[in-house]
Image (cartoon, rainbow, N blue to C red):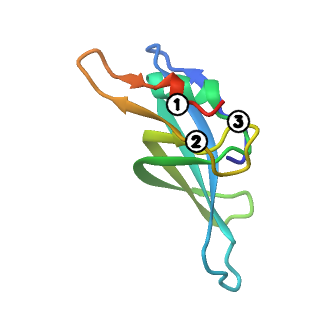
Amino acid sequence: MVRDPESRTTQDGKTVCSFTVAVNRRKKIPNQPEADFFRISAWSGLGETCQKYLAKGRKVCVVGSVSVHTFQANDGTTKANLEVFAEDVEFLSSGNQGGSGEQAQATQTADAAGGFTAVETDELPF
């Protein structure tokens, strides 16, 4: 994670937590960036869990659908923004760890009430 997560509440009362992750490229290609950046949006209970437990520098695994938005930068060039709508977020490190360690998982499961997040608190690494 490249920065701390930020949460907001929509007009209809839903919580969305946004954060950015950097994914290092395996091969260095001349004149190409060494990492790709993805903006993550986690909604409802999953978003609340992410806001509570995630912070800059932590490693996460995110599963979800990807969308691409293009925009004009101030210099006139066209840029692309990659956004993932998280369905599953796996916490790979705590604030004290730089990498491997125990893992915990938060999964958004939709039901008639709009969804909930199941988290096994005894498995959290922090």
* Residue that badge 3 annotates: 55
Q: Quadrant of the C terminus?
A: top right
Q: Crowdedness of circle 1 by 10 Å Cα count: few (<14), some, many (20+)?
A: few
Question: Alpha carbon of mark 3 to alpha carbon of mark 2: how far?
Answer: 17 Å
- Asked if labels 1 and 2 touch by Cβ distance under 8 angstroms, the answer is yes
* Residue that badge 1 annotates: 123
Above or below, 100 against 17 in this view is below
On residue 102, the disc is 2
Tell me where residue 57 appears, x and y as whole percent: 73, 45
Q: Is mark 2 on a helix, strand or loop?
A: loop
Drawn side of residue 31 relative to residue 122, left or right = right
Front position in the image: 74 or 30: 30
Tell me where residue 121 appears, x and y as whole percent: 52, 23
Nearer the viewer's eye, disc 3 or disc 1? 1
Question: Alpha carbon of mark 2 to alpha carbon of mark 1: how far?
Answer: 8 Å
Q: Crowdedness of circle 2 by 10 Å Cα count: few (<14), some, many (20+)?
A: some
Tell me where residue 50 appears, x and y as whole percent: 57, 30
Residue at the outermost bottom position:
30
